[in-house]
Image (cartoon, grey):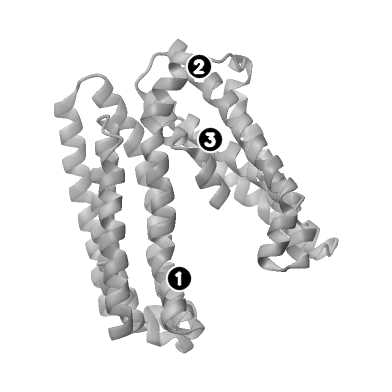
């Protein structure tokens, strides 16, 4: 995940935006340019990771990690290509194909896990093989509609256009990667591992809801908003934004109300009575999610309108506020302090 965030450099989001607003010839020029660039980047970083496996062993002192280091570059390359192809599908508005690709990856992953772990008893190596093969199948399905148009012809002008727009978004992705894990790290540093477990439990439902929002709503909202702005249809874009804010606000606040009313029952049903201490944090994190999804829609609209630098500035403020709030509130209130900080 860290390598994928590092290698993305914002090109995935930028690719989706530029594909959504271009004609067919321009689209395939972008696809070939970015695909060639991404292949070079991931192969270079993958090779560097493999050659640096001694450094990994020195950092983590794990023989198991050293033994599986050969698989890390391959996993990284396949994960990165699968993510890029998903962004390309998004830019072409191939939403059903995106859903089919995710289903293929999930079903294939389950089948391969059963084969490698249950029948062949390959342990961790079997899990890695299952992940690799499911990703490979997904990539094959994703690339099928474009395979006859892939020439790897590099267009310098297109690359500059996509890269310069996407680079601030890449910085924003790295900030978000750090931001989303900062509270858990501080709980571990300031409290104890048990509190980390309670907080991790309270984050499960909001994180799952966030992932569902990203995969089902934002993946459709972003390319459509980008297309409207590229055509100059600002009135339609405003209408789509307003309706989206109303819909997401209503649904998330309704779900949050249900969680607040039945927080203990939900935690006991999903995680057992041992984790009831995480129930108050769950309710607060659902409130934070309700606010955060509105910010996500507004930030996505900014990027769609061509303002790729603004989300980085917003995230810098978010990170500073969150870090300060966590440092102050976690020692005062414990795990629930991190939930207050999220709000």
Disc 3 marks which residue?
84
Classify 97 as above or below 160: below
Camera-side mark, 1 or 3: 1
Would residue 286 be visible to someone looking at this image? no
Q: Which mark is residue 185?
A: 1
Q: Residue 121 appears in which quarter of the rendering?
A: bottom right
What's the residue at 39%, 48% (across, down)?
214
Q: Secondary structure at mark 1?
A: helix
Is there a contact, CB below 8 Å, between mark 2 and mark 3?
A: no
Spatial CA distance of label 2 from label 3 is 14 Å
Q: Which mark is residue 299?
A: none
The furthest residue to the right: 120
Q: Looking at this view, is 313 or 137 the one in front?
A: 313
Percent across and percent down for residue 238 are 16, 34
Spatial CA distance of label 1 from label 3 is 29 Å
Would residue 165 be visible to someone looking at this image? yes
């Amino acid at each position: 995940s860290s390598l994928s965030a590092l290698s993305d450099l914002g090109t995935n989001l930028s690719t989706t935006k530029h594909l959504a607003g271009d004609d067919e010839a321009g689209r395939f020029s972008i696809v070939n340019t970015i695909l060639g660039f991404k292949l070079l980047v991931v192969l270079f970083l993958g090779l560097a990771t493999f050659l640096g496996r001694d450094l990994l062993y020195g950092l983590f002192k794990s023989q198991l990690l050293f033994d599986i280091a050969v698989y890390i570059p391959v996993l990284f390359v396949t994960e990165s290509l699968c993510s890029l192809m998903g962004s390309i599908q998004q830019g072409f508005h191939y939403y059903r194909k995106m859903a089919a690709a995710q289903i293929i990856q999930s079903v294939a992953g389950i089948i391969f896990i059963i084969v490698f772990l249950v029948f062949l008893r390959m342990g961790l190596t079997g899990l890695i093989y299952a992940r690799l093969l499911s990703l490979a199948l997904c990539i094959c399905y994703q690339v099928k509609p474009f395979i006859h148009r892939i020439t790897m012809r590099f267009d310098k002008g297109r690359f500059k256009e996509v890269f310069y727009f996407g680079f601030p978004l890449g910085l924003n992705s790295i900030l978000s990667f750090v931001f989303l894990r900062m509270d858990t790290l501080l709980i571990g540093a300031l409290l104890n591992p048990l509190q980390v477990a309670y907080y991790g439990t309270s984050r499960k439902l909001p994180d799952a809801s966030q992932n569902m929002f990203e995969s089902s709503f934002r993946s459709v909202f972003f390319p459509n908003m980008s297309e409207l702005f590229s055509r100059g249809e600002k009135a339609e874009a405003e209408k789509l934004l307003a309706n989206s804010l109303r819909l997401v606000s209503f649904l998330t606040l309704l779900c949050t109300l249900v969680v607040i009313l039945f927080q203990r029952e939900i935690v006991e049903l999903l995680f057992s009575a041992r984790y009831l201490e995480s129930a108050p944090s769950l309710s607060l994190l659902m409130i934070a999610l309700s606010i955060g999804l509105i910010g996500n829609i507004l930030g996505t609209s900014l990027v769609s309108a061509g303002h790729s630098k603004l989300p980085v500035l917003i995230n810098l403020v978010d990170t500073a506020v969150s870090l300060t709030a966590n440092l102050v509130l976690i020692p005062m209130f414990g795990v629930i302090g991190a939930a207050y900080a999220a709000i």
